[in-house]
Amino acid sequence: MTRTERYARWSAYLFPPQTFAIYGCRHLKRLKFDNSLAALRMWGFVQNETERLFRARQLGLKVVACLGDLGAVPVIVNSFPGVVAFYPDCLWWAPFVQESKVLFDAASEQGIGEATCYSRAALGAFAKHAYFPDPDLCLASTGASCDDYAAVAQLAARHARETVWIEEPMRRDAPADEPDPAAVSFLVQEYRRVVARLEELTGHRLTEADLHAAVARANRVRRLTARLRELAYRHAALPALEMMVVEFGCLHHYSDIEEWTEVLEHLLATAERRLGAGECAVSPDALRVVWVTPPADPLYLSHFEDSGARIVGTEYVIGQALELISETAPPLAAVAESFLAASLIGTTRRRAETVLRQVEKNDAEGIVISGIFGGSHCAMETRLISHYVHEAVGIPLLEFDIPDPAPEVTGQLRTRIEAFLELLAERRAGPGTW
């Protein structure tokens, strides 16, 4: 089957967001989308992922769920022919886009309630057997992974055909920022178990060439993403909502790396054209903000832009998915080394340093940290990051937790956001305006 024939049967898409709003994604009616064909193509592709996963199953492709590691294991899965990798983790946005607590309620029935991160929506999806086909295999992370999601994965395993657990080591912050050889060696052994199981599942004997090719494809996506981040955050060529989708595309490429690469190339051509023409998707004079931790409710990104701010940097806890993978080292070791840049397996100070680099690079005027109710790493890290960053640069910082799904930004948070942006505007205007 040629690539064209494969897409005609499996990965056809290009439905406008309105279609999915009619299907039940109510929040899409309130979000603001970039006015370009490339963005429309991106949204059609991303929103169509569930349907494409079910089509893949109908065509006999193996569907593999990756849980918790956020970016490394899909590189290995994508080395195998006839396999589709996806992240149930990303369903944590579904309750907000649908303005529905159905998945949260289903998770509560499984034993995880409101005291846990919104990622519990993935457990509800496993229990309902409706948001994705039952995976042929689950590859779930444990160890130094997010403890909330580790609990979700353990309960989700009751609904899975088979789960292979991958232990993640804690990253040692070496003075020279060099990879920890012991951690790399440990991860390589874990990844070899994954390879062995995937070989059994697919009947394909994996070669070094297969892995090198997969690394090169992943790096292509990461390089395109890096350029889009530069154009968006330095030159306002794309809005924050589309850019959050772009960054998270580095995790598993929305289940189709070849098509996602073409979507990114289309977006990049649009952003480059805007740069050359002096066009901007967001006012270049807007207040410059770095955003820390992805907002579970994407409406908040649009609200900030509507209120006179623009996002000029992010730390969405997926640093490992943005790192280039060495194309000269042995591929499993290269994947392991890139994963050791993970946002959540090292010290909070390292995360804060990532934020500071973006503040300095793009001359940010403020920082926003959007926490998650019940998210243990938010409770542990938010105040520490605030302390480190404030000590280093002293710019205003706004911390808040994203509330439960709602059709609009709530009154109290709206007031806090307005006050924060007023402060940034006064500081920009100078001491005489205070």
Image: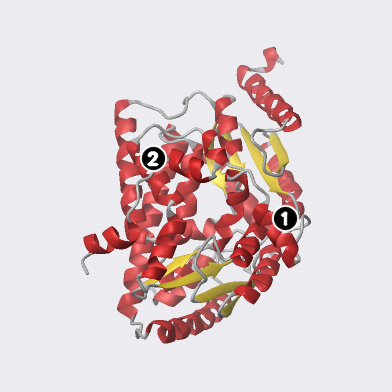
Q: Amino acid at mark 1?
A: Gly
Which residue is label 1 attached to?
375
Going from N to C along the chain, the mark reached first, 1 or 2, is 2
**Where's residue 272, x and y in %?**
32, 37
Q: Residues within 10 Å of mark 1 (few under 14, many from 20)?
A: many
Q: Amino acid at mark 2?
A: Ala
Quadrant of the frame with the N terminus:
bottom left
Circle 1 SS class: loop
Circle 2 SS class: helix
Residue 254 visible, this orientation: yes
Which residue is label 2 attached to?
39
Mark toward the viewer: 1 or 2: 2
Of the pair 208 and 131, the residue shown nearer to us: 131
x 47%, y 58%: residue: 50
x 42%, y 41%: residue: 230
Q: Residues within 10 Å of mark 2 (few under 14, many from 20)?
A: some
Residue 340 vs 434, above or below: the answer is below
Residue found at the very far top of the displayed protein: 432
The CA distance from mark 1 to mark 2 is 31 Å
x 55%, y 33%: residue: 30
Residue 168 visible, this orientation: no
Of the pair 108 and 324, the residue shown nearer to us: 108
Residue found at the very far front of the displayed protein: 22
Check contact, mark 1 vs mark 2: CB within 8 A.
no
Residue 135 falls left or right of residue 143: left
Residue 201 falls left or right of residue 431: left
Residue 422 falls in which quadrant of the image? top right
Residue 149 vs 310, above or below: the answer is below
According to the image, what is the colour scheme of the structure? secondary structure
**Where's residue 322, x and y in %?**
47, 56
